[in-house]
Image (cartoon, rainbow, N blue to C red):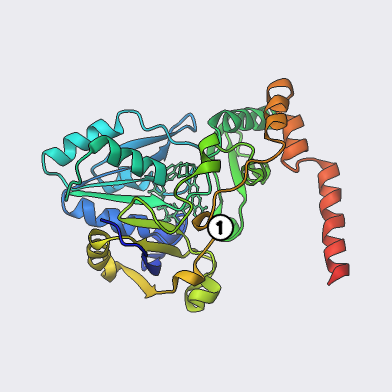
Amino acid sequence: MNWREPKVYAIRHKNEDIRANSRSGGIFTALSDKVLENDGVVYGCVLTEKFEAIHIRAENAQDRDKMRGSKYIQSKLGDTFVRIKEDVEIGREVLFSGTSCQVAGLKKFLKIEYENLICIDIVCHGVPSKNIWKEYLKWQQMKYRAKVIAVDFRNKKDFGWRDHVESIYFENGKKVNGRVFKNLFYGHSILRPSCYECKYKSIIHPGDITIADYWGIEKAAPEFDDNKGVSLALVNNNKGEKLLEQIKENIEWKKTKLEDSMQTPLKEPFLKPENREQFWKDFYENSFEYIAKKYGRYGLANKIKAVFRKIKVKLIR
Ligand SMILES: Cc1cc2nc3c(=O)[nH]c(=O)nc-3n(C[C@H](O)[C@H](O)[C@H](O)COP(=O)(O)OP(=O)(O)OC[C@H]3O[C@@H](n4cnc5c(N)ncnc54)[C@H](O)[C@@H]3O)c2cc1C
Ligand code: SF4
């Protein structure tokens, strides 16, 4: 049974390499390492060679490491729930990580509360459509006349934890940094329809522990804030608290206040944009370049507008 109010922590993994390779402070690796140590199984989201997000099962650190990093598209679950049921029923310790609606879906599927199942959900802005992601990559390949060989949805190593720059790596050695997909994501028209009515935009979550980027860390625990990533952990019940106790030797942690940690996705869903229908009509009827310019702030005209915006802000200040 989850508490009515979570206990709140700021967390950084003590291993700097792990933190650099994780989206925020590396809490997912610390939690899943404990499960692997106990001969358990970890389920989470990876990106395939075709750049699709899917959930996989991992029994070792090598496979689990592929789950690190946020993939800002909807992950395909396949037969994940069936496999989890098999694992928990033979007594393996299992950790499942995913969006809150995936965790809620798993619990509904299983019907029984298993003591040996740990659920970690992420504070979730919403999931963008994978069709847009696919067309975005095709457009990049056409523009640069080379095959995409790797992507980073949010390049923390080169730009720091707070910034949001996507990096695309090509077969011919080129690398492109941009913000078009990010701008479409934050424009909200590409979110799944259910995300506008998400039940989990509150402090109540279905996981044993809910994890996120610790936005507001500069107030909640400024001594943790080095722009290399801090995780927010909302501990929702006794099981989550017990697991957190077990990883404390590998992390730096501080108990913080809920009121200093309230980012928008913990309060309310994002509104469905008024121009959402127009966006999708445009997407089906036009080239991706048109979409990038109209909605993704791509191109010279948008660059000029951005410069004017910056000048205006400076003048007002
Ligand atoms: C779609 C999406 C929206 C997000 N929105 C927010 C937000 O609004 N606010 C916020 O603070 N943080 C958000 N996050 C990121 C969340 O902050 C991190 O997952 C969390 O900080 C974990 O940090 P870590 O350092 O332990 O990460 P990592 O070790 O990088 O952990 C990655 C974890 O995320 C899971 N994951 C990655 N991609 C997906 C996916 N597409 N679907 C399901 N699970 C996935 C993996 O299974 C793994 O458990 C979002 C992530 C995703 C994928
Ligand atoms: S915003 Fe809510 S409904 Fe949408 S993917 Fe995230 S948890 Fe699921």
Q: In which quarter of the image is the N terminus?
A: bottom left
Indicate whether 10 appears above or below 2.
below
Instruction: Judge: label 1 CB < 8 Å from ligand 1.
Output: yes
Is residue 309 visible from the viewing direction of this image?
Answer: yes
Residue at image point 38% right, 56% down: 210
Front residue of 297/139: it is 297
Is residue 44 visible from the viewing direction of this image?
Answer: no
Question: Would residue 152 be found to the left or right of residue 273 on screen?
Answer: left
Expressed as whole percent of the image width and height from the top left, the position of residue 201 reads 48, 52
Expressed as whole percent of the image width and height from the top left, the position of residue 164 reads 61, 53
Indicate whether 209 appears above or below 100.
below
The 10 Å Cα crowd at callout 1, few under 14, some 14 to 19, many 20 or more, is: some
- Which image quarter: residue 132? top right
Indicate whether 9 appears above or below 91.
below
Expressed as whole percent of the image width and height from the top left, the position of residue 211 reads 40, 57
Q: To which residue does mark 1 refer? A: 264
Expressed as whole percent of the image width and height from the top left, the position of residue 279 reads 70, 32
- Which image quarter: residue 21? bottom left
Q: Which amino acid type is shown beneath numbered disc 1?
A: Thr
Residue at image point 28% right, 69% down: 248
Residue at image point 40% right, 46% down: 100
